Image: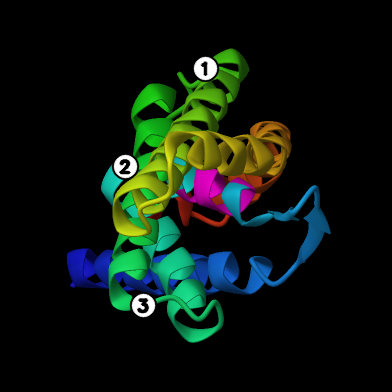
Amino acid sequence: MKKQRSSTYRTVFLAVMAAIVCVVTFFRFPFLGSKVHFANAMCLLSGLLFGGVGGGLAAGLGSALYDGLFGGYDFIQCLITFGSKFVMAYLCAVIAGSGGESRGRARTVAAGVAGSLSYVALYMLKTFVYQRFVYGYPYDTVWVTMLSKLPASLINAVFAMIAAPILYAASRPALARAGLLAQLR
């Protein structure tokens, strides 16, 4: 019975985190021809709280849900979003470690940096592939497009690198005191 209860808690928390990722994506503002948003910080927080697979699922599902319902993207682009956000949270979780008290602040920050930069790299790769091979633009146009998207992507990454460890440090003790932290992983 206790195993089933823990599984239910985990499923509910993953769904809530996916919903948070989706909703936070609405909070965006235009910057240099792109959009800066706060969803990447929530994706990293998902990885820190739920571990690799769970955090990746919450981050990927929340972001893909936003893209599919509100972003106007097709199924393939939603899958790409799911995959890149999954990788971001998964990598963050793997670098941060398996949790517990052994996780240090430096390791958590390094995990956030790696997760954020992996997403920027994947986003730039997606932009390159779509611009060059799907739309057939020449290389010089592709590079200009990529360079125009890079500043906002890096700002999103820096914000996520700063915000996610702070949010994790703030939420972890409360979840541990409530006895929920152990049930999230």
Viewer-side residue, 180 vs 37: 37
Region rendered in magenta: 41-46
Viewer-side residue, 168 vs 44: 44
Q: Marks 2 and 3, how far apart in space?
A: 26 Å
Q: Which residue is mark 3?
A: 74
Amino acid at dot 2: Gly
Amino acid at dot 3: Asp
Work out whether 140 lies above or below 105: below
Q: What's the mark number on residue 118?
A: none
Residue 140 visible at all? yes
Closer to the eye: label 3 or 1: 3
Is 3 left or right of 96, judged from the image as shown? left
Quarter of the N terminus within the rendering: bottom left
> What is the magenta segment's predominant secondary structure?
helix
Amino acid at dot 1: Arg
Q: Which residue is mark 2?
A: 52
Q: Which residue is mark 1?
A: 107
Residue shown at 69% from the left, 72% from the top = 26
Residue 86 location in percent, x, y? 35, 50
Residue 182 visible at all? no
Q: Marks 1 and 2, how far apart in space?
A: 15 Å
Residue 122 location in percent, x, y? 40, 39
Sequence-wise, the earlier of marks 1 and 2 is 2
The quarter of the picture where residue 57 lies is: bottom left
Q: Is residue 120 magenta?
A: no
